[in-house]
Image (cartoon, grey):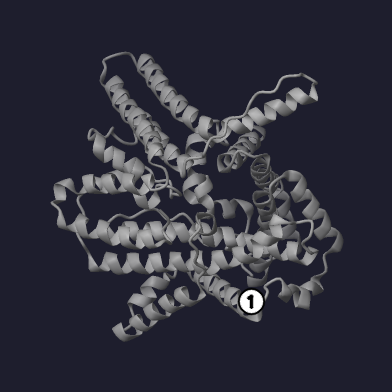
Amino acid sequence: MLFNSIQFLIFFPVVILFYFVIPEKIRYLWLLFVSYFFYMCWNAKYALLILFSTVITYFSGLIIEKIKAQKWEDRKIIKYKKYCVIGSFILNLAILFWFKYLEFMILNLNRMLNVFHFEIHIPTIDIILPVGISFYTFQALSYTMDIYRDKIHAERNPFRYALFVSFFPQLVAGPIERSENLLRQLKIPTRFSVKNAEYGLLTMAYGVFLKVVVADNLSLLIDPVYYNTNDSSTIALTTGMILFAFQVYCDFQGYTQIAIGSARILGFQLNENFNSPYLAKSIKDFWGRWHISLTSWFRDYLYIPLGGNRKGKFRKQINTMLVFLCSGLWHGASWHYVIWGGANGIFSVLEDVLKPYYHKMIARLKINERNVLWKGFRTIVTFAMIDLTWLFFRVNSFREGIGILKRIFAEFRIKWFISSGFFNVFGTTYNFVIIAVSLLCVMIIDILNYNGIDVRKIIFSQQIIFRWIIYWMIYLIIIYWGVYGTGYEQTQFIYFQF
C-alpha cells in the first residue's frame, strides 16, 4: 500500500478513527494489527519475515537481560551477552542475505568460475525482494545491541515490541527508529490533539507535494534518459544527472515527511531523516544531513565497534571506507551501489586527509570562511561531488556510468543551459515551469530550515483565513501539478527497493 494511493487515503482515516475510539489500554494492539495489514498488502507471506525478526530479537533481549542478572564474574557475563548478540545478528542477517544478496553472490561466483575456465554453473534463484526488509531488520538489530550496551531495558510485552518493529508509518522506508525513542513512546497511550493533527496533516501534505509534484515530474524526464543512454544527447544526460539528485531527495524526503506526519497525528514523534542536505558545505556535513537514521546506525553499530577514530589515522580511514562500502551494499545487491558507496567513502577520506592543507590555504589567502560567497562556493562544490556519485547510484552498471561521464566531460559546454536543447529536455514550457517553480519552493523551504526557521510554525501563526488559503493552494498544486498512475512501478517510492 503506497502513501500516495487511494487505498492509503481510505486506510489512514479508518486507522485514526478506531485508534482514538477504542480503550487506551489496547490501542497499541490495534496499531499492531493495522501495521501488519499495511505490510501484507504487498505480499502477505512476507509478514512472516517481520515476525521472525521480531521473535528472534525479542527473545535475544530477554536472554541478555537474564544473563545480566546472573551472579557470574563480569568476564563470563560479557562473553554470553556477546554470544547472544552475535546469534541475533547472524539469524537476522542470514534472512537479509538470502532474500537480498544470494542471487548477487551466485552471479558473481559464476563469473569468477568462467574467468578461471571452470565448467561449473551454479543455478540462480529467482527471489522477490521483500519491501523494506533492510529497514526493519536494522531497526530490530539496533534494539538487541542497545540492550547489550545497557542503553535500554528489554521490553517484556511481545505485542508492544512487535509494534516497534512493524510500526506502519516508517516500516518500509524509515526513518530507522531507535528503541529509546519509538518504543518508549509506544508505552504511553496517546490522545487526540488538534495541534498534532494540524502539524501532521501539513507535514504529510508537504511530503505528498515532494513526491507527486517534484519527484514524479522529474522522473518523467529522467527515466527515459537513463533507460536508453546511448540514444540520449549529452545535454540530456547532463541535465538528467543533475536533476536526479533532486529526484531522489524529494522522493525519499517525501516518504519521510508523510511518515513523520502520519505518526504525529497518532501522537508519536519520529526523528527527522533529512536536514537540508544540499546546503552542506562539505562531504562530512552532507552525510550528517542525508538519511540521518541510516548514517547514525552505521556510525553507532559499525564504525565505532570497528574502532572509529580511536586507533590511529590510517585505521580511521579504513573504517570510514568500510562503512561507506557497506552502506552502498545495503542500498542494493549490485556493484554500481558499491561503487556509489566507495566514491562517497573516497571523497570523505580525501576531505579528512586534506583538511590541514585546507586550513593552511585559508590562512595564507586570508579567506573569511563566514563570507556568503565562500559558503556558496563550498556548497556548490559539495553538491557537484555528491551529484557525481549519484550517477553511479542511478545507472545499471559501472561501465554505463563511466561511459556517461566520458561523454559529459568530453562534450560539456556551459552555454548548453541557455540553449534550446536544454529546454527541449523538459518537453514543454509548461513542464519546465512546473519543475522550476516546485524546485524553487523546495530550495526556499530548505534554506529556511537550514537557518532554523520552521515554515509550519509560520503558517500556523497566521490568521485562520490566511491559513486556509495556504492549505487550499497546497491542495490545488498537488491536484493539478501532481503525477498520478495506477501502476506500482510508476508510483512507488525509490527507497522501497531497499
The percent coordinates of residue 162 (x first, y second) are 30, 38
- How many numbered callouts? 1
**Residue corresponding to mark 1:** 432
The one nearer the camera, 364 or 446, is 446
Q: Residue at x 57, y 71 (%)?
A: 439
Residue 230 lies left or right of residue 339; in this view the side is right
Check the image and name the residue furthest to the front: 486
Q: Residue at x 66, y 78 (%)?
A: 428
Residue 68 lies left or right of residue 424; in this view the side is left
The percent coordinates of residue 444 (x first, y second) are 53, 73
Q: Residues within 10 Å of mark 1 (few under 14, many from 20)?
A: some
The one nearer the camera, 418 or 281, is 418
Can residue 293 be seen in the rendering of this structure? yes
Element assignment for label 1: helix
Check the image and name the residue furthest to the right: 410
Please say if 443 is above or below 292: below
Can residue 181 be seen in the rendering of this structure? no
Q: Residue at x 51, y 75 (%)?
A: 481
Check the image and name the residue furthest to the left: 23
The one nearer the camera, 188 or 17, is 17
Picture quadrant of residue 463: bottom left
Picture quadrant of residue 64: top left
The percent coordinates of residue 92 (x first, y second) are 44, 30
* Amino acid type of the residue tagged 1 in the rendering: Phe
The percent coordinates of residue 285 (x first, y second) are 58, 54
